[in-house]
Image: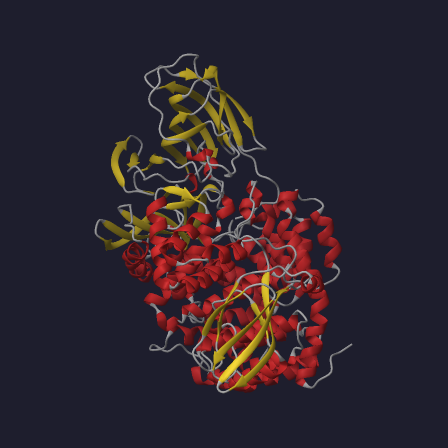
Amino acid sequence: MRSFALVSALALAIAAPPVLAQTPLPAANPASAAGVHSDLPRNAQPLHYAIEIVPDATAMTFTGTTAIDIVVSEPTPTLTLHALELTIDKATLTPAGGKPMPLTVAIDAAAQKAVFTAPAAIAPGSYRIDIAYKGAINTQPNGLFALDYPDKRTGKTARGLFTQFEPADARRFTPAFDEPIYKATWTLSAVVPAAQMPLANTPVVKEDALPGGRKRVTFAETPRMSSYLLFFGLGDFERLAKPAAPGVEAGIVSPAGSGEQARFALDSLAPLIPYYTDYFGQPFPLPKIDNIAGPGQSQFFGAMENWGAVFTFERILLEDPAVSTPATRNAIFITQAHEVAHQWFGDLVTMAWWDDLWLNEGFASWMESKATDHFHPEWFPLFERVNGREEAMELDAFRTTHPIVQEIRTVDEANQAFDSITYQKGEAVISMLEAFAGENVWRDGLRAYMAAHKLGNSRTDDLWAAVEKAGAPGLTAVAHDFTKQPGIPLVRVTSATCKAGKTMLTLEQSQFSRDAMAETQAHPARWRVPLLVSAGGAPVRSILEGGKASITVDGCGPVLLNAGQLGYYRTLYTPAMLKALRKGLPTLKPMDQMGLVADNIALSYAGYQPLAPSLDLLAAVPGTANPVLARSAFAHYRAAWEALDKQPAVRAALVKRIAATWKPRLTALGLEPRADEVMPDAALRSSLIGGFGAMGDPQVLAEARQRFALLQANPKALDGPLKTTWLGIVARHATRAEWDRIAALAAGSGSAVEKQALYTLLGRAQDPALASAALDFALTDKPGQTTSAGIIATVGGMHPEQAFDFVLAHRAEVEKLVDSSSRTRFLANVVDNSNDPALVPKVETYMATLQPDAAKPMEQALAALKERLQSRPRYVAGLAEWLGTKPAR
């Protein structure tokens, strides 16, 4: 959710007659809360919206009328609402018990506002604003947008309409008080083709036939909610449904002809409602929960938590037998677990302003892992918290990072807030705080928080207060350290001695950094760091405060300072301790093995210790390891292989080492899926095949090409969970003829998901000429409006400099292919894949064209690029030394 230049909007201003009959005012406007930012004057609040929309999917336009019941809290000459890319034809203001009066409208496009002025000043009281307006249906997921796709029954092109409003695009759909704190009830109606299915947050309560094959549908009134949670959809859909809880029905809405592709999603969705109802202590307050499948994709989001009407892109909601991978079921479940968690944490209780976005996203990320572990422990979902922590630390280790709770003032800044600090660091910190408080106390605190703030708004400290009151003294201080300041604690073990079966440790706190090591060592930030330390005996909980501390634990085994991997910090051990950990690694829990390896590789890459001890830890992970741990270990090896792109001799030595451990595991798994295998084994097979294929392993590459040849006679010959894995190998090593064949397969597919996946593979070619062809192809009409950006992004993964130059050369054309919320991050993500010093001045020149509030992602990408140029040679040299080879000069 991001943009290159500040998008426009409108604001409403209204004026009332000098003397009006007044009705009693409601309680004080919550929008006047101290410290809550607003773009609006804070002189009015909405109570209820009644919206009627008339979409024209052919003309890609819509008309609308909105009646907003408001309360004016202070005398004002004008009232201001948000609006964006809307043409307002007429507006009136009606005082309670009075007559309507015309309003004049002044549009401030740059501020995304419309100001409405009445004939005289508006006195405090109750009013209704009636507005008639027109807008555009977009081709990217912003506001009301269209997605085109092949009909699953006929193959003809079909069009569905959907909405995406977070964080600030409800104003593209209707003039509104488009900020989270302005909660109101909503009634939506629509005039639509009689044969199509309309969708909204609530069920249809009334349907009237109209002339010309149309109908007017009216949906039930919603509970009080923020504008960004409103949803409308329309198309040739079908709905698979079942009861979820007393009075609540769960449904999966998908393109007609989807049939049983929606079954797993539905069977996963329904049990989440009673699970979260019990956990949060609040019933689901709507009569239905739909998850709506949309073909296509976004560079900004995969799914959106509209209350009662979740929207999810089809590739992570439906099981397409042609291309669904081993990880598809996992993605379906965790995505739904995330979005359904939002129905409480975000929808029922909403952050007051985007500063506290993490209250939505960090908690939903944490809850998705908890729910998945409850329903599918055999998937080992809690292991993903290690990966999430590492992803967050990739961003958090630079000067350009930001705290979890950050200051947001503009639309672009709100778009940029949807990053790994908000999601993954948020989840990691919550996991740590839950362990600090204890599971029962933590849950009791959350239940009290939900009860106190339901249907309202909250700030982060409201949550800490509730958990402390439930029985976690001292939690707020720890939470403030990790949410109000950026960065990563570094816990150094300066000594470890064992006597009489006990290990005595001396610890020192510092700060981990990728681009400011000397600075952070001299003047580190300080945290109260919760530790869970083990040395073969019972783990000991402790809080590291200040610079130094001593801890004594039972046992004389290998010391682990982050047992259970629940702490958000890095641990620097002594060389002797690392040797002991390497020797004892297979005896540690798989999650601890995974976290320990990742932590030490990051420390070595940043220069805190030599690389060899970290690689020794990696090599100690056996080829028979837990499948999730095995995937992680293999991914570290693959990253090392990628780093050796200019070192063929070192690469060859590394491949030999990788194959010795991991080819036997692939042989044991086999090249074909097995009916009785668990998802992690299937996912590991795909990773191993894909990884060895990328490395050019002769056996795997020959197998991929042999299977690819079968498609000549039968385009469905590879259909199944490994189709895109095998085709991905061919695409990477493709000749022009093979590249053209993949393009033809995509064009001929009747599946929107398969078409998108195959077209995106065109960007994976390692041949620069084919990468250029993919970039040119992305600007044609063939891939589809939302797939082209994915092709460009994929090229950026293999050829970042080439993709960067192309985007700048075709900037206006590319921006049309990227949803406005993701524009500021789109090119930054390309830079994240580069190791070319020649890109530095290009990025700096480009940054000079950006508005200050849109520059942060590129600043972060540039800082990371400069640091990689320093660290990568050291990393490559360390790999060569470990492998006993010499790097090329």
How are the colours assigned in the image?
secondary structure
Provide residue 452's location: percent of width, then percent of height: 35, 45
- Whether residue 524 sits left or right of residue 101 in the image: it is right
Provide residue 886's location: percent of width, then percent of height: 73, 83
Q: Tell me the residue at 40%/31% (across/down).
A: 28
> Is the residue 811 above or below the residue 584 in the image?
above
Q: Tell me the residue at 37%/75% (across/down).
A: 678
- Whether residue 845 sits left or right of residue 186 in the image: it is right
Say which quarter of the image contains residue 652. bottom right
Question: How many marks overall?
Answer: 0
- Whether residue 514 sits left or right of residue 159 in the image: it is right
Q: Is residue 876 visible?
A: yes
In front here: 342 or 289? 342
> Is the residue 733 above or below the residue 409 in the image?
below
Q: Is residue 750 visible?
A: no
In front here: 629 or 536? 536
Provide residue 776's location: percent of width, then percent of height: 62, 54
Image quadrant where one finds the C terminus = bottom right
In front here: 217 or 302? 302
Say which quarter of the image contains residue 659. bottom right
> Is the residue 154 above or below the residue 765 in the image?
above
Q: Tell me the residue at 39%/59% (across/down).
A: 367
In front here: 617 or 416? 617
